[in-house]
Structures are given as C-alpha cells and as structure tokens.
Amino acid sequence: MVTASTVQIAVLRGRQAECREIRSLLAAPAGKALLLHGEPGSGRSALLAYAHRHGRGRRLLAAAGLPDEAMLPYAGLQRLLDPVLDGIGALPERQREVLRRAVAGEGCPDQDQLVLSHAVLGLLAEAAHDGPLLCTMDDLDVGDAPTARLLTLVARRLPQLPVVLLLTAGSDHGADAIPGRRLLPLDESDSHALLAARRPGPPPPGPVLAGLSALAAGNPQALVDLADSLAHGQWHGLEPLPSTPPADGGLGRAYRGLLSRLPGETRRALLLAALAATAPAAPDLADHTDVADPVTLGRALRAAGDSLAALAPAEAAGLIRFTAPGGVAFPRSLARAMVEATASVTARRDAHLLLAAAFDGTGARLRRALHLAAATDGPAPALATELADAVDDRADRSTAATALARAAELSDDPVLAASRQVTAARYAWQAGDPGRARALLHRVADVPVTSPTGGLAELLRGEMRLRCGSAPAALPNLLAAAGALAEMDRESALVALVRAGEAVCFCGDQYRYAEVARRMAALRRDGDPPWADLLTTLVAGVAATLRGDHAHGGPLLRRAVVFGDRLTSAAATPTALTGAAVAGLLVAVDAAAYRLADRAVELAADRGEVSLLPRALELRAMSEYWLGRHEAATQSCREGLRVARAAGQRSSAGVHLGLLAVLAAVRSDHDASLGHVAELGDVAVPGSRPHALAEWALALLDLVDARYADAADRLAALARPGTGRGQVLVQVMATPHLVEAAAHDGRHARARAALTVFDRWAGSTASPLRRALSARCHALLAPRGSAEAERYFRAALSLHPCDAATFERARTELLFGRELRHARRPREARGHLHRARQTFILLGAEAWARQSTVELRAAGESVGTPDPDAVRLLTGQQLRVAHLVASGATNQEVARQMFLSTRTVDHHLRNIYHRLGIRSRTELVRALG
C-alpha cells in the first residue's frame, strides 16, 4: 500500500494522542507492543515513520508485509530479523533449528509454534544486549499469514525484554490480547489544517475546505490526493469540486492493492454491493453507513452466478459488514466510493446491467433507470425521459439529483438538458449538498437569467449565497430571479422575494425591504391560493412593521399566521410554514409561532429537505425563547447548528451560534456564551444578524457583571433608528435589557428612545409578556422609590404569564425587590426576592440567583447559596428528615415513618432550612443533589 509518509510530512495532523502513546512506549524500560489499525490512507505508515524518528537510542528492525510474498511462509519474519540473524548461534539448539528452518522457507509445524516464538524472543534478547530495540512491521495483514500469527505470539511475551514492537494492519482481526489503537478519521479542523498546509499560498475559501473535508471523510491520504489533484480554479472556488478522491491517487492505489488481494468472485460481488448501496436519506440526521438492499443484491449475485458467501473475504478485510440476513453495509462511505472508482469501466457497466435486471418487475422505476443510465454511453433521449419521469416528491433528494443530472447528460435537447440540470441542482441543495449543487449549476452558467431555466438557476444561486455565503451578495441574485420568473413561474418568483426579504434583514439593510414589498405587491393576484396569499401578506406585514406602521402591519401578520394554520396537503411547504412562523413572532403570538415552526421542522425532515431545516429550527428556537423554554431553545439551536454545518450553511450556523450565545448569557454561563461568540469568526460581519446576536449576548454578560455602560452602548449600536440600517428586530427584542442597562447608568434619554419603539410594537400585540416587559421598563425609568415605579412594577407582575417565561417574571421580581429595598421597605422586598431566587435556582441561572441572594442579605435575610456540601452540617436525624422530605413525603408522613411527632418534624425542618440557607422543599431537593 502507499506509505502514509506522503500523507503528513512534518506534522501528523489529528494524531497527537497516537504520537504521545508511541513516545511513551519508546521511553518505557519494559518491553511493549502496539497495533495501529485503520482504513487505507489513515496514516499508519506515517506513525511508524514517526516512531523511527523518535526512537533514538534504540536499534531499529523494520519490515513491511508484501503482497508478492503472501504465499511464502515467514518471508516477512526473515526480512525483519535479517540484521540480527548472526546471533542465532546463541540460542538453544532446538530453537535454533526451528528458527533456521522457518526463515529458510521450510515452514514450521503447528506444534513448534511456541518454540519458534521463544526463538524469536531469544534472538531479540541477544540483540538487545547492545541496546534496546524498536521493531516495526507495517501492513502486517498484507504479507504472509505465518509471520502475522507468529508476531502476535511474540507481542504477548515482551514485558521482560527492552523491546518495543509496533505493528500496523487494516483491522485488529486476529490480534487478540495485543494493545491496539484504531486510527479514527480526522476532525474538521485538522482536515482543514492539512489541506491548507498542502499547497503554497493562501488557503482555499471556507466552502472549498468544507467540501473537500466532506469528500475525504477525514482520511488523510484522501485529503492529500484531493489537494494535489485540484485545478487552480477548483482550489479557489471558481470551478466545481470532484465527487470523489482521484482513482489514480495514493488512496486509489492503496484500495486497488487491497482489492487485488481478494478473490475474483469477491471483487465482483463487492462491486455489485457498492453499486447497490444507498446512502442515508438524511445524512445530517443519521450515520453515514451505506447499505445494500438484501433482495436486490441477492438477485444480482444469483444472476452473476455468485452468492453472499463470496463477500466473506471483504468482511474479513474490513470493507463491509453483514447486517440483516442477506444485507451488506459499508461502514465507511469512502470505501464504497473507492471500490466503485477503482473498478474498470467494463466491470462497472456489467454490474449496473445486472442490478438493472434485478429491479425488473419490482416497481422501483427510478433505481432501475439509474442503473441502466450508468451503463449507457452517449445521448439516449428515451432513457433520459424515463429517468426524469421516475423522479417524484417522494424520492430521496440526493438520488433525485443523481437521476436528473444523468438525465441531463443523456438528453439531446440542450434546453431540456439545462432544465434538468437546474432541477438536479435544486434537489442536491435540498439534500444538504451545496457543493454538488454548485457543480451542477456551473454547467448551466451560460444560460441567460431571463429564461425560465436561467431564472430558477439564479434563484438557487441566491438561496445558497444567503445560507452559505454572503447575504448582500445574495440579494441581487434573488431580485434578478424574481424579475425573470414573474411572468413565467410566479410561485418561484414569490419564493425569491421572500428570500430577498430574508437577505435584507440578515445583513441589516432594512431600508431595502420596501423594494422587496413593492415587487411582491405587483405579483399579488385576486383569488390567490392560500400559500401565495400567505407569502404576499407576510412581506407586506413585515414591510409595515419595519417602518413602524404597526396598525397596518399587525393585522397583515396575524392574517399570515391564520393562513399558515390552515395550510394542508401540498400547500403546506416548509417555506410557507416558516413564513407564517416569522409572522407569528412579529406579532408575539409565540405559541402559534412555535407550532408553525415545529411543523416546518417535521415536514422538512420527513421530506428530506435538509436545506430548509436550519431556518425552521432557528424560528422554533426563537419561539421557545419567548415562551420561556430556554433549555428547549438551546436544544433546537444545537440541532440547527449541527444540521447547518453538515449542510455547509455558514450563515445559518452563525445565527444558531449567536442564539446559543444569547441563551447561555441569559443563564449567566460566561464560558459557554463567550465560546459561542468566538466560534462565529468572520461570519459575524458588523451589521449582520450573527453579529447583532453576539453583541446582545455580550451585553447580557455586561449586565450580569454590572458593566451597565458597556451593555447600553452595545445594544444601542445594534441599529440606527430612522435610517433603516442595523438589526432593528434584534434591538427591539433586546430593548428590556437596553433600558435596564441605560437606567442603571443614568442615561434615561437613550433608554426612553428605545422604549418608545418597543412600546409601539408591544402595544400593537396582544402579548401579556411584551406588555409586562414594557411596564417593567417604565418602572426602571420612573423616579426611584416613587409611586409611579411601584405602580409599573405591580402592573408588570400582574401581566407576566404564570405558566410561561418564568425567567422574565423572576427578573421583574428581582428588580422590584431591589426597588423596594432601596425605598427602605425590606420586609416587602424579601417576598419578591425569595421568589426570584427560587426561580433562578430552578432554572440554573446561578449568577442571577447570587444577585437575588445578595439583595436578600441586604434586606436583612440570612441566606446562602444552596450547596450540597452543606449537607455535612446536618445531624443524622436531620439528614434523614431532609431526605424523606426531598423524596416528596409530607411532614405527617415523615412523622409516621420516624415515629416522631409532627411538631418535632416541623422543628427539624426549620433547622434544616436555616443550616442550608434555603426556604423551600424545592431548594432542599436541589441542595441534596
């Protein structure tokens, strides 16, 4: 196989743990062995080379298993021991004779295997008299089996010798009781670093790095082969990337070598399995195991005169694993791809024809047509039509992309071919593969935007730029697409304008939304179906809201929410549902917004439209935030971030990171919040939504740490009222925090200006929470200790929902308690502060709980932060009472179980509360862990 020394020359990216283990072995005085195993190209040989470089002070004995010597018993052993065979005379006579016969090619009977292993150990001990040894055997499983078997025996008997034995193989099969380490795929950061270091000059753009990393699946040799084979335009993102690592690269040669050692019938069966295997329908939501359908594979194998048993050697080689009866899975998609890529054209064609025949009469029109198309050269219009007609909305998006791309290649009509190419790109994008979508669009780059096909291509380019790249750059594409499609494909034109509105809001250029609304109004028609009415109403409502006309925008947005709830069947698309969810958030009907966003998530997942999941999850998280379900919102964001990254949507990932930073800051988790902000990197362009969310998160941390001026400055800079620039919607959401910070800092004028905008919006909604927040803000701006402040605080508490947004209610309780304490009314303050503290403890908002504790102490209450260690302060009987109460027992039940009076239990419970610094059973549960 290709030596991995070509993979990583100076730095072994992602192999730090293995390098540390090797250095530890080399530094140990006792003898040890280690088996490094992994797929071809994983860097096994590179690690042996690393050991050679760091084995200074040890005599080196090195060899490698050779395929040409696989049938020569002990050929590998002879090459490994050749430098020290002159010491064979020091061995006992029987060991000497057995070893001589083995290395002379005469073999060794089974009954002498133990004698032979002792002979090798004795020879190594003799050689170690001049200094410790390092023995390495690369590709143990490639050479002769007797050598491999013997070295495993030797490896188990090394502790008494100053010898380190390092072995490498494709798997740990047959190496029981030998310490082993599997070489895992490189993670994304190490993959990117390896790629960037491979070629001189600046690294490729982010999408290229992400695309190459996905293709290589963390395989170092695949990364190197891809980097070395790319043209200048591909490296810099100007041309599409290949679909697999090059078949003539180092990894391809390694796989050809591996496959050449398999029997002919195994290679044929393996190719059939590789071509029959399908990837998961939603790779962002499942593992990447490719699975061959047992029925189809069985039919094809029988037609070829083979059986499933022919695949046993492939399983032993680690290429496949057997699943359900007759099923075959490729644990690594890269292995499946290389089996296909390294096969001859003739072998692939024959295998595809066998698989096509296996689908005859099964009703699997698409799969049959795909295999026929793969076995066909040149234009084939009838087959192209069969392929295109076999694709429907139920088809897996990735498979549909493959089918339509192949249909385009087989078409003899250039216009029809271009249309199919663009549809294939759309399916690839929906499947979460923007790199493939770009490659398909690259083939129709010359199609005029004014044509139907060109307009759809421009819409797709705009969507991908919006989610994956630059929102400002996406806007011209989306507006051009809307203009081109207005008369020919109004549905797509409406979607283009909705996306254009999203681009405007994402980059903070709200003043441009008026143009989007004007174009959308021109496309509105009387008698529009509900989905179209929803989109046009949404854009009109958002435009009115952004210009502050809530009297006009509110009813429009509420109407859009109603439309969304009424959508059924084909009209209920993720795009329409997310639009309705946006409308719900803007008019503060949070439960409806959550319901619509959650429905969009479910529908996008069911349909395999991965590209729409991050946006739907973002809106669900926002709804959960306003509903006070912060933990659920965090989970939605984590899921959205994972899907966005898997689908290459950097912009969407940035929004989720920003939301995660805000949610962490709300619960005062400094490390997590700052970590998410740091992860944003260059996605957080000033003025963009990710940047605004990051600033909101940092302002919340400032607020927690009493840096009020900094918090107010950050939040005030989010938007510039009157200019239509900046993140107005984020600033409105953050206004309660801006007012609180500015009020503490004494800058009431700034706070009142922001509150005026918030009040106009909150007053147009029917949301008790928004009105409660408005009242709280007015209380903070009223004179301290005044009746006006108290009136507003009490109004806020009466408006706060009891069953939702408990965090914000607790914040109001804390601020009101602080106000009452400052007004020298500590007894009244304590009730509010206790309730705030208890809620913060339950929500895990430790910093806010500490603030409540400080205020309580200042109000004359002796309290401390619940601490499990404080349980040690309890007596044995108190501890038993505490555990029974924490388990849910009433005081009467505790009294009966402990044979005490209820009054004694009450007395114990008061003392327990006092010692632990708590006031409730809920806090007791928390204190006891």
Image: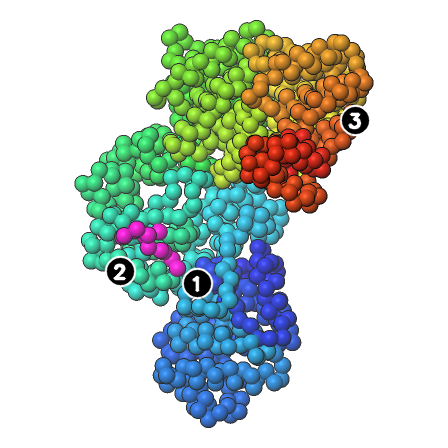
Q: Does the magenta stretch include residue 396?
A: no
Give the structural element (helix, strand or loop) at label 2. Answer: helix
Type of the residue with mark 3: Gly
Residue 639 point in image, percent of width and height: 51, 36
3 vs 2, front mark = 3
Residue under pointer 1: 171
Q: Does the magenta stretch include residue 321?
A: yes
Question: In the rendered view of the protein, which quadrant contains the C terminus?
Answer: top right
Residue under pointer 2: 309
The answer to whether residue 58 is above or below residue 822 is below
Type of the residue with mark 2: Ala
* Residue contact between numbered discs 1 and 3, judged by CB atoms under 8 Å: no
Give whichever of 475, 803 is nearer the camera.
803
Alpha-carbon distance for marks 2 and 1?
20 Å
Give the structural element (helix, strand or loop) at label 1. Answer: loop
Q: In the picture, residue 744 is in which quadrant?
A: top right
The type of colouring in the image is rainbow
Q: What stretch is highlighted in magenta?
A: 318-329
Question: In the rendered view of the protein, which quadrant contains the N terminus?
Answer: bottom left
